[in-house]
C-alpha cells in the first residue's frame, strides 16, 4: 500500500518562503503535503516526474469577480489555466448577497455595466436559492469547484438590502438603526465564515468615476459615507479577524489616504489598497502611492497595495463598451440597448458635447492613440491598424466623428484597442521592484469581452523573472503566493511546507508562455469572451488532486470554500 496519494519527484522546489530553491520530492496525503525530502516512486499511488521542472505553490488572486462564473465554470478560467489555485470573490463591493427575492433582477443588472458580466449568462446560470449571505455561502459550498474560494461580504448589496435601493442611491447617511443592521449582517456573514468586506468608492466627481450602474448612475458604494466604512471596520476590530478591500478615489488624495489609515487603525486588520498602477504620463502617481504604502509599513499599519502588473490594454466595440463613464456625455451616449446606443452615437446634435467632454485618462491611453483593429465593411478596411489620430488625418474629420461614424456604419461592431496606460517598462519596474505590492488585479470573471488579465502569473514569471531578470524565482513565487496569502489571511496556503494544503504548480520555465488572444463562445446565454491560454504548465494540483495535466482538465473538482481562510 503506497504511503502517499501523490508524489512529486525530482523537481526544483521553490517553496514560496523566499528560501533558496532546492531539488527535492513532495509526498501528498489526504490533500496535504505530508513530507518534503527524498521519497521513493514506489511510495506514491500516483507519481509526477518533475525532473527539469519548477515545483511551486499555487498562485493566489486577491482581485476577481468570479461570483457569477463559478455557477457555470468550476475552474474559473482563464485563471486556473495560469496556475491560480485560490481566488477571492466579492471584490469592489459587488456581489449577489444578501439580496431579497424581489431584487434579484436588479442585482444582476448592477453587474452588467460596472463589471461587464453578460446579463443572459447570469440569468441562465444563477440558481438564486439564497437570500442571506450565510445561505449564499452554503450555495457556494455545494457547487463543484476546481479552485479554492475566499469570499468578501460586498457592501453594495448590503446597502441595498438594509436601506432599499432608492435610499441607498440617494446618498443619505444611514440611520443608527440601519448601521446596526449592517453590522449584524456582517457579523452573521463572518459567523458563517465570510472573510471580511469590500467596497469600491469612485467618487462621481473624482478622476476615476468609471464603472457606473447599468443606467449610468453612480453605484451606491460610490456615494456611501466614510462613517459606514468605519462601522464595518469596527466589526472586524471587535472580532479580530477578516480583511478588507477598498478602492477610494476622490479629488483629495490626502483625505483618501487618511481614510485608509483610519480604517486600518480602527480595525487592526489588513486592508488592500486598489490599485498601484504605473501611468506613463503621470509617473508621480505610483511613486506617491508606493511612498505612502512604505510609510504605512514603517508605522505598522496593515495597508497593502495590489499592483496592476500586466499590460492593461483593452479591446472593445461600442456594442458593450462601458469604460467612458467618467464623461457625462459619453456615459449617457453609451447607456442602453445596442439600438439606443447606435442612435445616440450617430446623433450629430450630440457630437459637440462628445468632443468637448473627452474621456479622462484613468483607464485608457490618450484618445488619439486608440487603434482601429477590425472593420466589418470592406470599404473601411483601409482604416485597420490606424490610430484615431492617423485615421482622423486620413478622413479629414475630427477624431470623435471618425470613430463614431465608423462604428455606427458597422452597427457598432467595429473593434478598437485602447493601449495601456502602463506600457513604460522602466515605470513598471518601479512597481514590480517594490517588494510589498502583490501581483494581480486580474478582474477575473469581469470585463471578459475587453481584457484577459488573468494571465498575470504566467506573464510575471516569463517577463519579470525569466526574461528581464528583475526578480528571482524565489522572489516571484513569494509575491504570487505567500505574500497575497499573508495579506488576505489564508490559513496555511501560499507556501510548500509539511502540513500545508497541497496546492501546487509544476511547470517548464523555458517553455512557459502566454498564448495569443482568442474568442470563445462558451458562456451561458449564447455569450462570448476573450481568453488567453498558457503553455508550459505540466501539472496543477489543488488540495492534493491533479486538476490540469499538460493543459488538459482532468475533471477533478477538489476546490474548497475557504471558511475563515481555511
Image: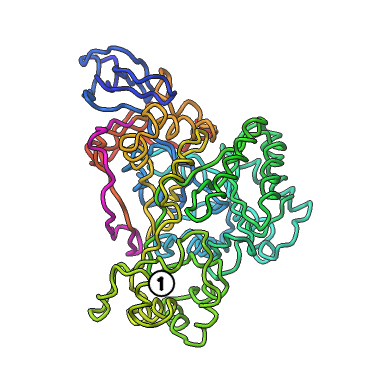
Q: Nearer the viewer, residue 135 or 427?
A: 427
| Residue ID at (56%, 50%) | 285
Count how many numbered circles sit on residues in the image: 1
Residue 398 lies, in percent from the top left, at 43, 80
Residue 190 lies, in percent from the top left, at 61, 39
Quadrant housing residue 124: bottom left
Asked which secondary structure carries label 1, the reply is loop
| Residue ID at (42%, 69%) | 368
Q: Where's the N terminus, which quadrant? A: top left
Q: With respect to residue 43, does 209 lie above or below? A: below
Q: Nearer the viewer, residue 472 or 495?
A: 472
Q: Nearer the viewer, residue 258 or 93?
A: 258
| Residue ID at (64%, 35%) | 295
- Residue 515 on the magenta segment: yes
Q: Where are the magenta residues, as a range?
A: 505-529
Q: Answer yes or no: is residue 74 visible.
A: no
Quadrant housing residue 147: top left
User: How many C-alpha atoms fall within 10 Å of the one at disc 1: few (<14), some, or many (≥20)?
Assistant: many
Q: Residue furthest bottom?
A: 349
| Residue ID at (34%, 63%) | 527
- Horizontally, residue 83 falls left or right of residue 64, namely left
Q: With respect to residue 374, does 309 lie above or below? A: above
Residue 261 lies, in percent from the top left, at 68, 40
Q: Which residue is mark 1?
A: 318
- Horizontally, residue 243 falls left or right of residue 81, namely right
Residue 9 lies, in percent from the top left, at 25, 20
- Residue 417 on the magenta segment: no
Q: Answer yes or no: is residue 294 visible.
A: yes
Q: With respect to residue 435, does 145 lie above or below? A: below
Quadrant housing residue 507: top left
Amino acid at each position: 500500500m503506497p504511503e502517499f496519494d501523490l508524489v512529486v519527484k525530482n523537481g526544483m522546489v521553490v517553496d514560496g518562503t523566499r528560501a533558496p530553491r532546492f531539488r527535492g520530492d513532495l509526498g501528498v496525503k489526504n490533500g496535504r503535503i505530508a513530507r518534503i525530502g527524498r521519497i521513493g516512486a514506489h511510495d506514491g499511488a500516483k507519481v509526477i516526474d518533475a525532473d527539469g521542472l519548477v515545483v511551486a505553490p499555487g498562485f493566489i488572486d486577491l482581485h476577481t469577480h468570479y461570483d457569477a462564473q463559478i455557477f457555470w465554470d468550476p475552474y474559473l478560467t482563464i485563471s486556473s489555466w495560469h496556475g491560480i489555485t485560490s481566488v477571492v470573490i466579492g471584490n469592489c463591493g459587488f456581489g449577489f448577497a444578501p439580496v431579497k427575492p424581489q431584487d434579484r433582477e436588479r442585482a444582476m443588472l448592477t453587474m452588467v455595466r460596472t463589471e461587464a458580466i453578460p446579463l443572459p449568462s447570469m440569468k441562465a446560470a444563477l440558481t438564486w436559492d439564497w437570500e442571506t449571505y450565510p445561505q449564499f455561502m452554503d450555495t457556494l459550498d455545494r457547487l463543484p469547484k476546481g479552485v479554492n474560494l475566499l469570499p468578501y461580504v460586498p457592501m453594495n448589496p448590503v446597502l441595498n438590502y438594509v436601506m432599499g435601493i432608492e435610499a441607498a442611491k440617494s446618498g443619505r447617511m444611514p440611520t443608527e438603526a440601519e448601521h446596526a443592521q449592517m453590522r449584524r449582517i456582517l457579523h452573521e456573514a463572518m459567523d458563517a465564515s465570510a472573510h471580511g468586506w469590500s467596497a469600491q468608492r469612485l467618487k462621481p466627481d473624482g478622476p476615476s468615476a468609471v464603472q457606473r450602474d447599468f443606467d449610468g448612475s453612480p453605484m451606491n458604494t460610490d456615494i456611501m459615507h466614510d462613517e459606514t466604512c468605519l462601522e464595518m471596520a469596527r466589526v472586524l476590530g471587535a472580532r479580530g479577524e477578516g480583511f478588507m478591500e477598498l478602492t477610494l478615489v476622490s479629488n483629495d488624495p490626502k483625505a483618501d489616504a487618511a481614510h485608509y489609515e483610519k480604517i486600518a487603525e480602527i480595525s487592526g486588520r489588513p486592508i488592500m489598497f486598489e490599485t498601484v498602477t504605473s501611468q506613463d504620463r503621470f509617473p508621480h502617481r505610483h511613486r506617491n502611492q508606493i511612498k505612502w504604502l512604505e510609510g504605512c509599513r514603517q508605522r505598522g499599519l496593515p495597508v497593502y497595495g495590489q499592483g496592476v502588473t500586466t499590460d492593461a490594454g483593452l479591446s472593445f466595440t461600442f456594442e458593450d463598451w462601458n469604460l467612458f463613464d467618467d464623461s457625462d456625455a459619453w456615459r449617457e451616449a453609451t447607456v442602453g440597448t445596442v439600438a439606443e446606443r447606435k442612435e445616440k452615437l450617430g446623433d450629430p446634435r450630440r457630437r459637440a458635447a462628445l468632443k468637448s467632454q473627452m474621456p479622462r485618462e484613468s483607464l485608457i491611453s490618450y484618445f488619439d492613440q486608440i487603434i482601429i483593429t477590425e472593420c466589418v465593411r470592406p470599404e473601411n478596411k483601409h482604416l485597420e491598424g490606424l490610430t484615431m489620430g492617423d485615421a482622423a488625418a486620413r478622413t479629414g474629420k475630427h477624431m470623435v466623428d471618425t470613430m463614431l461614424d465608423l462604428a455606427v456604419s458597422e452597427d457598432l461592431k467595429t473593434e478598437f484597442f485602447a493601449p495601456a496606460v502602463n506600457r513604460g517598462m522602466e515605470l513598471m519596474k518601479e512597481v514590480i521592484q517594490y517588494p510589498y505590492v502583490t501581483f494581480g488585479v486580474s478582474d477575473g470573471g469581469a470585463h471578459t469581452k475587453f481584457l484577459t488579465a488573468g494571465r498575470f502569473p504566467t506573464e510575471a514569471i516569463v517577463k519579470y523573472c525569466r526574461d528581464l531578470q528583475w526578480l528571482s524565482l524565489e522572489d516571484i513565487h513569494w509575491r504570487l503566493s505567500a505574500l497575497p496569502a499573508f495579506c488576505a489571511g489564508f490559513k496555511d496556503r501560499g507556501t510548500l511546507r509539511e502540513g500545508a494544503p497541497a496546492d501546487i504548480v509544476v511547470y517548464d520555465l523555458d517553455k512557459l508562455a502566454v498564448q495569443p488572444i482568442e474568442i470563445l463562445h462558451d458562456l451561458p446565454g449564447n455569450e462570448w469572451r476573450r481568453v488567453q491560454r498558457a503553455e508550459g504548465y505540466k501539472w496543477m494540483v489543488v488540495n492534493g488532486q491533479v486538476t490540469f495535466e499538460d493543459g488538459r482538465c482532468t475533471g477533478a473538482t477538489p476546490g474548497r470554500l475557504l471558511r475563515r481562510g481555511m
